[in-house]
Amino acid sequence: MQKNEPKKPHAISIEERKILKATGISDVEGFDETKVYAMLEDMAFTIGGKNLKVVSFSSESGDLAVEGEIDSVSYSRAISRKSGIFARIFR
C-alpha cells in the first residue's frame, strides 16, 4: 500500500453465529475448519469456530464471507510477511 492511499474501512457483521461478513480485509493468509487467518492493513484478524469455510473473498474490494459455527473473532498486531502467521503457528 502506498503512503498516500487511504486505509480500507473495516467492519464485521455476524448473523446468528453462522455467517460472518467483513470488510477492509487485505489478504487471507490461510484457513481450515477451525480457524481463518486474515490480514487487515495493519492488524491480523482471526476467526475461530467449527466447520468454517471461506465462502468468498475479494482482495480488490476487501470483502470476506465465512460460514460455519463462529466462536471467536480476535485481532492482533500485524507481523511481517517474512515470518508469516503460519511460521508462528508451526514453530
Image (cartoon, rainbow, N blue to C red):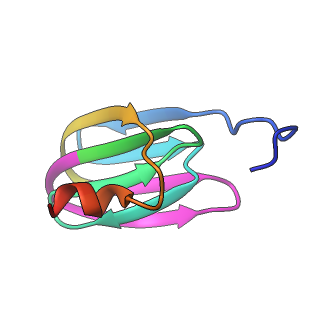
| Number of on-image labels | 0
Q: Which residues are magenta?
A: 48-67
The residue lying at 23 percent from left, 39 percent from top is: 17
Q: Position of residue 29 (x, y in %)?
A: 40, 63
The residue lying at 31 percent from left, 45 percent from top is: 46
50 relative position to 16: left or right: left
Q: Position of residue 3 (x, y in %)?
A: 82, 39
The residue lying at 48 percent from left, 58 percent from top is: 81
> In the image, is residue 15 above or below residue 25?
above
> In the image, is residue 47 above or below residue 59?
above
In which quadrant of the rendered image does the C terminus lie? bottom left
Q: Position of residue 74 (x, y in %)?
A: 29, 33
> Quick one: which residue is furthest to the right in this view?
4
Which of 7 and 72 lies nearest the eye of the viewer?
7
Q: What main secondary structure does the magenta stretch of the protein show?
A: strand
User: Which image quarter: residue 60?
Assistant: bottom right
